[in-house]
Amino acid sequence: MSLLADVLTILLNGLQQGAIFVLLAVGLSIILGTLKFVNFAHGALYLVGTYAGLFIALDVSLTSGKLQEWGYADVGLGFGFLAALVFVPLFVFVVGLLMERFVARPFYDRPDTDQILVTFGLAIIVQELFRALFGSNSLPFEQPAWASGPIALPVVGNFPQWRLWVIAITAVLVVMVYLLVEYTDFGLVVRAGTRDAEMVRLLGIKISRPYIVVFGIGASLAGVAGVVGGPLNVVNPTVGTDILVPAFLTVVIGGVGSIAGAVLGGVLFGLTTATLIAFAPAWSQVGLYAIAAIVLLTRPQGLLGSEEVGA
């Protein structure tokens, strides 16, 4: 394999790994930037999306957990992956609406530490609930038949087809969210409420309505990340907490509230991880924290964040 082919392969692998970070970070960033709410349960939404996608798309045989003990070892609807891509975002959107109403809203005026404690506690509860019901064993999440196997690319040669689909799905969703926030009346109200919520209320706009929708959109993006990332990683109750820190680091280095910053941070993290896996696997996780440390030391507000956030 030529040097150019190696470089392009690393680039594609980095974009795929970064795509999962981007989906999580965009949802997390719009919640944090708009509602000023620190949601440490965002990883739990990823967990819910992963398991929901698995059970909607496939027939699954459980080997442990309470459901298996109760005689429900074979679960799953087997509707296929496309059905999971449609229904999981809707389901997690509703979960996000409920979380905003009953968990986030009572804590909007509370200190960040209170928000962190309540959402992290919720994340642990969700994780342990999934562990009790479905067991600790990893479950196989097969790639969809229409996107499995390699595809021949110029220069690169054979490359896993599903990785390209992950990149494409992420790009489409991020563009849709960006257009919604930047070029619609809904986005205008949300951005105005972020700058001066009291003025928006004086204009007769009930700001809580767009806020709850923003939370739901952020949650649904985490759900989609769980669906598209499921076939690329192990599926077990710890996936939510495992992905949480990289997602927050992506938001921090990109800039809180910036969709472009979340994309830049996710791509940077993905490319760094893919490069280190190729040349220094033992340092692949350390590289993420090193980048975050460098960015925070040189630009506290993030690469594309505002000075107000940095302050």
Image: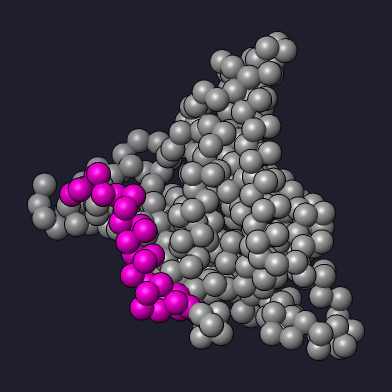
Find out whether residue 244 is within the magenta segment: no
Per the rendered image, the range of residues in magenta is 279-305
* Image position of 71 with respect to 51: above or below: above
Residue 68: image quadrant is top right
Can residue 275 be seen from the camera position used here?
yes
Q: Nearer the viewer, residue 239 or 88?
A: 239
* Image position of 45 with respect to 216: above or below: above
Q: How is the image coloured?
A: one colour
Tally the marks: 0
| Rendered residue at 57%/34% (across/down) | 237
| Rendered residue at 82%/70% (across/down) | 208
Percent x, y of residue 40: 61, 54
| Rendered residue at 56%/85% (across/down) | 308
| Rendered residue at 42%/61% (across/down) | 266
* Image position of 197 with respect to 16: above or below: below
Q: Nearer the viewer, residue 46 or 187?
A: 46
